[in-house]
Image (spheres, coloured by chain):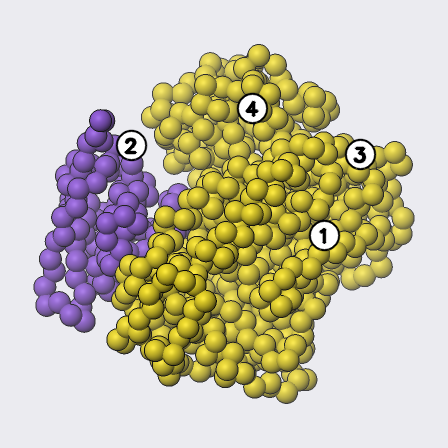
Amino acid sequence: MFQEEQATVQLYRFDPEVDTEARYDEFKVPYQGRSVLDVLLYIYQNLDSTFAFRWACEKHFCRCCVVSVNKKPVLACMAPAEKNMRIEPHPKFKVTKDLLVDLSHSKETEV
Amino acid sequence: MIPAASVNTTATGVRLQPIEGCQVEKEFIETDVLIIGAGIAGCRAAIEAHKHGMEVVLTTKGLFGKDAGATWMAANGYQCWGIYPNDTLDVHVEDTLRCGWFLNNQENVYAFLAHVPDTAIELLRWGSRYKMKEGQFLPEWQLGCSTKEGRSITPAQWPHGELGFNYSRIFPRLIRARKIAVLEDLFIIDLLTNKDTVVGAVGIDIRTGRVKVVNAKVTILATGGYEGLYKVTTANPNLTGDGQAMALRAGVDMIDFEFNQTLPLAVWPPEIAGHGVPFKLILYFDGRMYNSDNERFMAKWDSVKMERSTRAIISRAIFHEIKAGKASPHGGIYTGATHRTKDFIDEKLKEFERTPVFIKLKQAGIDLTKDYIETAYGMHYSQGGCNMNSKCETDKPGLYAIGEVASGGKDGADRMMSNALPYCMSMGIIAGREAARRAKVIERVEIDEAQVERICRDALLPLQREDGVRVYEVKPLLQDIMTRETGYGRTEEGLKTALSEIEGYKEEIIPQLYVANKSKGFNFEWINALEFKNLVLISECIIRNALLRTESRGLHDRWDYPSPDRDWFRNIHLRLADGAFRQWTTPVDFTYWQPEPGSLGEPQHKGVRRREYKGWRAEPLYKRM
């Protein structure tokens, strides 16, 4: 049977109310022809919905899905997924929980 | 506090256990005017109500000015009459009615469009920048406009700057400067009623999982549409018909659910799939559409305007070509501008080539001088919603509706292109003013505590179930049904199948919905599950209305009744009472305009004036700038 190639995703997890330091959860997910947002949604909808992240329009307008992939800040909906990804919160903002950041002071697109 | 252990459910086979820490804490807020939804309509209403001295609370289910809503995604359309002396309010209204197949509520169309020049000046004053020439707006021509100069005011940076982005800078600043309270990440579950009056709303603070109860003298619904019900949409998929569903559960008179607007979207190449490039080609590159027989099929649908017909006609034509087996390899038709010279295309590309979607087009290796884009269509705008009068009042005292959630028959069978934002702005002005007027004279009505408890208990059920069905398993299935059966070419058989499937969702799936994530804060899975309940309710409304309308008109296309019918100059209303739907129809009142003799309302035909509109209208722009 045809098996889609899987990406290895290291997902940043940190809940300031419980954790003292961040940890990384690892997932294997199909990635070819998908965006980073698709990969995150795949994990959220199929593997683990306990991590927090924000998404909305899926077409680069709302600028909510800012994350950092392999240390590079991107909009998850626009960035193509890669074979090895370490997905972390956007470094410019304060982390609220997991990939969620406090965007209330962002003036405009930061990526 | 709600004792979780006392929760009961009628569903069988679902284990229900109280989870520790699942009881909700409640926070009470009192205000004069509560506005649910902070898009352009909600913001404008907040500004107006605040101007009249009201205390205002504005809520949004996402981040203010970022997600939750379609306003911030708007491209460039804003039709505004009065830039040229020959383009009067009456011309704008006639165009709107022709696009709407004369099904519009003419009183509402006049009342809302009468404000539009004022709103344009206001936006300019607030810092929105437009293309200008000699101190006057330089408009662009958009579909449906009958004057050749066009009337759509265009952002100065277009196509590199879009209206939505422009607004996302302006409105948050205006709201903050007025110190209007904005509750972000607040998902409103339901409206609160006391006897028949709407007295506020109850919602979940997504950040903490706590419940917020707002008691307001007047509530304004501005929650947008239900585009999330369809697989492919140009709008924000987190528009899930929350406002429509709340209004339905509160027993409000709803109207026009059979009309869901679509527009042409690319299906191939994959780099631009789902983007509106073909539509841009039609508008700006003089693009043409062909079927697999290399035939310009629009000639059959609108021999005069061809591809520049209305969006309903274009989408329907595409559907019928695909259905007739004249589709491209990836299930679309072909759009291109290959008949134009290379110079023309290069000149146009200079304007567009730096926009994200044209960059993707280039990456896909498309050369517009010789290549075509395969085109289908996708959900764009929902026309079903609350019925309200020209003061934006619904039939429930204390509840106003504005923007996309407010239908009121303003769009008829098909909304004219670029009419949505002007409608939102003027309805915001009207509703803000009327809400303030009402809030000043009425006494506060207490909320019904038992109702709050009931709503919270229902909302908590998916969190408390230990197993069952997850929303992500069933939502794609619902989207499949709706895309398949309630797109174009609807049939009685298909609609009845869909209706019975929806019954199944109501009776079997919803009572088993559970969320795997049990945390209280930032639990989007829980919110998605609650949204799903709203989507199922809206689905039923769409199907029921589509079944009743036995003709094809505008966006409603029945395979078994392919032509418009003279007897169907009627709007379909719908009300949910005691768990059952009641439907009735009302004839369209041709107060000011009627279709040309011999026409059945098709946009190709003009209107005939019956009476002059005597109400207030703004001073036209050419006299003011």
Q: CA distance from mark 2 to mark 1?
A: 43 Å
State whether discs 3 and 1 lie on one chain.
yes
Quarter holding the N terminus of chain B is bottom left
Q: Is residue B278 above or below residue B328?
A: below
Residue B134, image x, y percentages: 62, 43
Q: Amino acid at mark 4?
A: Ile
- Residue receiving disc 2: A33
Q: Please name the residue shown 73% across and 62% down the image.
A: B390
Q: What colour has chain B?
A: yellow
Q: Please name the residue shown 51% across and 24% down the image.
A: B332
Q: Residues within 10 Å of mark 1 (few under 14, many from 20)?
A: many
State whether discs 4 and 2 lie on one chain.
no
Q: Residues within 10 Å of mark 3 (few under 14, many from 20)?
A: some
Chain letter of mark 3 equals B
Specify the label residue B572 is tagged with. 1
Q: Is residue B586 above or below residue B253?
A: above
Secondary-structure class at tag 4: helix
Q: Please name the residue shown 23% across and 26% down the image.
A: A2
